[in-house]
Image (cartoon, grey):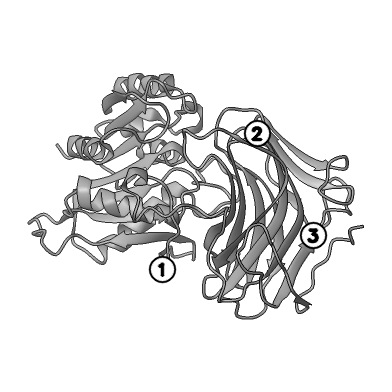
Amino acid sequence: MKTSTDIRLILPLVVAVAHLTATPMLAAEVLLNDSFEHGGDAPDGWIQGGAVAGVSYIYDSKVASSGKCSLSLQKSANRFFPIAQWTREIPLDRDIKQLHVACDARATRVTKAIVDLQFFDAHGNPLGHEWAVFIGQKQSSDRPVTHDWKSYSGTVPVPEGTTRANVALQMYGPGKIWFDDLQLHDSDPKQGGPLESGVVPTDDAPANATEPAPSDADPIYARSETGAAARYLLLPPSPQADQPAAGYPLLLVLPGGDGSAEFQNFVTRIHERALDGKYVVAQLLAPPPIVWPTAFSQGMIPTTEDAIELVVGDVARRYRLDARRVYALGWSSGGPPLYAAITRQETRLAGVFIAMSVFKPNQLSTLEHAAGRRVYLLHSSDDSVCPFSMSEQAARQLQAAGTQVQLKEYPGGHGWHGNVFEQIKQGVDWLAR
C-alpha cells in the first residue's frame, strides 16, 4: 500500500533500480517521494499546465503502478508544440550537485514524453533545465513506444546558484503516458548521467548531428534596465576569419524542440560547416516552462522578441557587428517567434531563416512592418507535423506586404534531412545577398 504524498528534505534512502542500472544507488537524501494518492482535481502539490489543443490532463484514479492513482497526459493532436506538462516545485536549501529521478511509466503509442527538471535561482530567474527521463521515439524512424508499467531513471547536473527546481512531467507529441511512484533525491556523484532514458550524445554520431545532447556550457545573461534577462550561448568567429571592415555578421539561433542548450553541438556544427566560422553566433536558450514565449504568451518577461533585441545589444558590446547583417535562424518551435520578431515595427534583424515551422498571422503584428526585410523559408512538402501549406501562405502574405521571400522545398518530412549544413549555408547566403 502506498503512503501519502511526501516531501522529506533530509532522510536517508537506499534506492536500487535493478533492471536499469548495473549497480544500485548509494545512500542518498530524499527530496520527493510522490505516489499521487491524495488530492482533488490534481494531486497535492502539482499544477496543471495551460490548455493545449488535443491534450487531456488526467488525474487517473483507475490506473496505477501500485496503489490507486497515477498522473497522465494524453495527446491526440499530431503536433509537438505547445508542450503539455504537470509541474511540482521542490525547494533546494543547500548546495546540490546532481539530482536523480526514478519513476514508473506506462505508455501507449508515445512519441515523446519527458521528465524535465527546471532550475531557478533565489530571484526566480531560470538557470536552465535538464531531461532526466525520455520516453518515446529517439529517432524519427522509430515506432511510438507502447509498454505496461516500466521503471525509468536518470541523473542530471544542478546549475550553481539553484535554490528551487520544478519537476515537470511533459508530453510533446501524440500518445498516452501515465506516471507513478516518482522519486527525486540527491544523487551520489559516483553515479553516471541519464541511463536508459538519457538523450544520445552526438559528438561521436555524425549521422545524428542534428539531435540534442547534454551540454555543460555556461550561458551568458543579457539583462534589460528593468532586470529582465535573456540567456544565450556565444560562439565567436574563427581566429582564422578576417574581421570585415563593416564588422562581423551575426546569426542568432533559436533551436526547435525545447529550445535548450542541448542543441549546442548542432549549433557549433552550423557555425563551423555552414558559416565557415566567419559569423558570430548566439544560441538563445528558451526559458522554462513555455518554449519561446511571444507577446501573445501570458506572464513571460522578456518575450522572445525582446530577448532577441537584448542579445543583439549584448553581443554588440563584445564584438563590432555589421548592423546590416544581423540574422536569425529558427526551426520548428523556433519559427513562430521569428515571424513575430521580423514583423515588429522596430527590430535589429535584417532577415530570418525559418525552417519546418508554422505560420499564424493572427498572432503577429502588421505584416507590413517586415517590408524591405528578408525571409528565407525551408520546408518539406511531406511534413505531417507542421503543414507545408503554412509556409506557402507565409510566402504569399509576406511578399504581398513588401517582404523579400524565398521558399525552398525539400523531401523527407519534418526534421532536418539530406545535406543539412549545405541547406543552411544556402539559406544564410541568400539572406546576406
Quadrant of the image occupied by residue 430: top left
For label 2, the SS is strand
Between label 2 and label 1, give the one nearer the viewer.
Answer: 2
Q: Amino acid at mark 3?
A: Asp
For label 3, the SS is strand
Indicate which disc, 1 or 3, sits on the residue closer to the N terminus: 3
Label pair 2/1, CB-CB below 8 angstroms: no
Query: For mark 2, what is the residue?
Result: 175
Label number found at residue 218? 1
Label pair 1/3, CB-CB below 8 angstroms: no
Label number found at residue 34? 3
Residue 346 or 112: which is nearer the viewer? Answer: 112
Q: Amino acid at mark 1?
A: Asp
For label 1, the SS is loop
Quadrant of the image occupied by residue 184: bottom right
Label number found at residue 332? none
Q: Residues within 10 Å of mark 1 (few under 14, many from 20)?
A: some
**Residue depicted at 43% across the width and 57% down the height:** 261
Numbered marks: total: 3
**What x and y, as percent, mark residue 420?**
28, 38
C-alpha distance separating marks 2 and 1: 34 Å
Indicate which disc, 2 or 1, sits on the residue closer to the N terminus: 2
**What x and y, as percent, mark residue 148?**
73, 41
229 lies above or below 358? below
C-alpha distance separating marks 2 and 3: 23 Å
The N terminus lies in which quarter of the figure?
bottom right
